[in-house]
Image (spheres, rainbow, N blue to C red):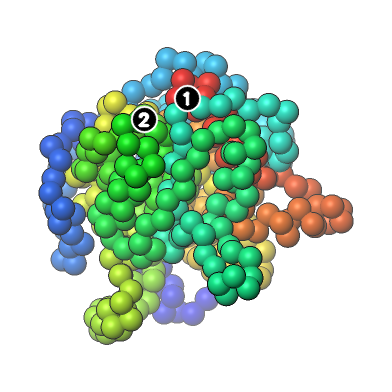
Amino acid sequence: MPWRRLQNLQAVRGLVTPPPCYGERHQCLPRGFLQVRHESSTSKPAGTPEPYPSSYSSSSPPSSAPSSSSSQHHSGSRATEDNASPSSREEKAIDPRLPELGRLIQDDYAAFKTHYSTPRYPIVLAHGLLGFDEWRVAGPYLPSIHYWRGIKDAFARNGIECITTTVPRTGSIETRAAALSSQITQHARGRSVNIVAHSMGGLDARYLISRLCPLTFRVRSLTTVATPHRGSSAADMLFRDIGPDLLPRLYAVLDRLHVDSGAFAQLTTAYVNDHFNRVVPNDPDVQYFSFGATASPHLLSVFRLSHDLMELVEGPNDGLVSVRSSRWGEYMGTLDGVTHLDLINWTNRIKRLAARLGIVTERFNAVAFYLGVADMLAKEGF
């Protein structure tokens, strides 16, 4: 590893800080409130805990989310932010840091179940950074690419109402949340919805719930999947590699290309912990669920470098988001052997082919996972 990257890694360590707890609801703020602050913020309220404790008791923002009385209907143990405990699992070599983070999910979503319950409210799918609903690379000449590959169709086959959304790919959280709210209003005005969000989409949804306070629809639950609720040290390293001298030039180039760059700085650990989490508390009328993921990428994986560096700073991760950062509200568990892209079914076709050839054993199917999320929401009464 080059010495310069080691220096950057040491610098990143100092940025990983937990959010303080703000259980009370704040009044809705006008657009333009949430701005990226480039100056460093060192002031913290009294009682701010040390970085990433193994349990989050009085210092946990998720404590404002109520526990569902119907949680016993869903099979399998779960860990909340206040009481994380692993379930029994097959014996294998696992990261010793994982047990304190909650249940390790290994084969629960390897195959489809014979039946999935239907949620009471429609599911809104919110994509992450650089995401989209449907992308036509060559117009009508080639098949389109779907962000939620196969998931929307599986919902339809199982009678689950689903709304897919598209927000600015690299826009700020504020901009993306406004677009998300507008599209939900368009498709579900006057109704209640469940939001299921991947990656940055979870931050958009949290901002929508807490700050935009929509009156045209009601969010009943938010389920986040590998969302960087405490930022990502991968974003920290990216900004440090670019450096303060080149950063303004990069922003200028992006502006000339009409590319919104608001999202990038808002994914750093410093921004999410010191700013976002302070002003975006949980809504006590919304149930919050979350999943994390961990994997050991192969040598040719695009996540190899980011995973290894994040492993030193934050611990187990999926290549872009750590397990600790993914925990929010009622933590449902950690998906083992699953990367950030596996979670949206982009790489699973290759893995399924390898499984058919007997090269590997298929242990995760993204479509089965999201059907499982829908089933869980239905059994929770949502």
Can residue 50 be spotted in the picture?
no
Please tell me which residue is depicted at 39% across the width and 69% down the height of the picture. Answer: 237
Q: Quadrant of residue 365?
A: top right
- Whole-angstrom CA distance, mark 1 to mark 2, is 9 Å
Residue pointed to by mark 1:
120
Which label belongs to residue 192? 2
Q: Quadrant of residue 347?
A: bottom right
Residue 61 position in % (x across, y down): 29, 36
Type of amino acid under label 1: Arg
Eyeballing the image, is 273 above or below 63?
below
Judged from the image, the secondary structure of the residue bearing numbered disc 1 is: loop
Residue 233 position in % (x across, y down): 39, 60
Please tell me which residue is depicted at 27% across the width and 57% down the height of the picture. Answer: 175
User: Would you say the residues marked 1 and 2 are in contact, meaning their CB atoms lie under 8 Å apart?
Assistant: yes
Judged from the image, the secondary structure of the residue bearing numbered disc 2 is: strand
Eyeballing the image, is 40 above or below 23?
below
Instruction: Name the residue nearer the viewer: 89 or 374.
Output: 374
Please tell me which residue is depicted at 39% across the width and 42% down the height of the picture. Answer: 187
309 lies left or right of 36: right
